[in-house]
Image (spheres, rainbow, N blue to C red):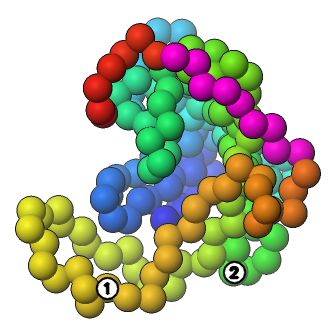
Amino acid sequence: MKYLQMPKLFVILFEGNIHTYRQVFLDRTEHPKDLNPSWYGDSIGHWEGDTLVVDTVGFNDLSWFDFAGHPHTEQLHTIERFRRPDLGHIDYEVTIDDPGAYTKPFTLYGLFPLMQGEIMEYICQENNRDVSHLTGFQPPTLNDGGATSNRQDTVGSEIKPSSRSGAR
């Protein structure tokens, strides 16, 4: 990921499988009333000291909220916190609130290293036979506060049965 900060806009560029971007509007305090659900929702942000707090609503329900395949509905509401504790890392926290999929909100944490170099071009191709040369990269993952986390305030959540069926 690469972060671009401007006075009224914060942009997150994604490398790899989804190769896209996300916009966080810093000059708004409310979400539009007539949102059309979208893949990334509508994100507004503000600064609390050295932490960027991002409030996002308006997601469609056509994806998972992570690569592990956890579901969500159009009721998904996230609050993210981005903080740079040192030159080489981004401390990330996200609270997931989706009463259509989970019985209570829960929080996930991550610590993302500074990206070395530029974002690489990515082209998805069937029968890719050239993956073996890509070594030495372990993508950062979020955890739920388990044994590897030093955080004590993570709350788990039960998954509600879904009326939807089939893989996404």
Q: Quadrant of residue 147?
A: bottom right
* Distance in Å between CA atoms under marks 1 and 2: 23 Å
Instruction: Identify the residue position indicated by label 2 in the image.
Output: 88
Sequence-first tag of 1 and 2: 2
Residue 3 can be seen in this image: yes
Q: Nearer the viewer, residue 138 or 122?
A: 138
Q: How many marks?
A: 2
Secondary element at image label 2: loop
Name the image quarter holding the C terminus: top left
Q: Amino acid at mark 2?
A: Gly
Secondary element at image label 1: loop
Query: Is 37 drawn above or below residue 42 in the view shown?
Result: above
**Which residue is at a point 80% across and 38% down the rendered structure image?**
155
Q: Quadrant of residue 131?
A: bottom left
Q: Is residue 38 left or right of residue 127?
A: right
Whether 160 is among the magenta residues is yes
**Which residue is at a point 71% across and 30% down the rendered structure image?**
157
Query: Magenta part of the protein: which range?
Result: 153-161
Q: Nearer the viewer, residue 80 or 153?
A: 153
Residue projecting furthest to the right: 152
Q: Quadrant of residue 43?
A: top right
Q: Amino acid at mark 1?
A: Leu
Residue 93: image location, x then y, percent = 72, 50
Which secondary structure class fits the magenta region best?
Answer: loop
Q: Nearer the viewer, residue 111 or 147?
A: 147
**Which residue is at a point 31% across and 59% down the rendered structure image?**
17
Whether 37 is among the magenta residues is no
Query: Is 85 drawn above or below residue 152 in the view shown?
Result: below
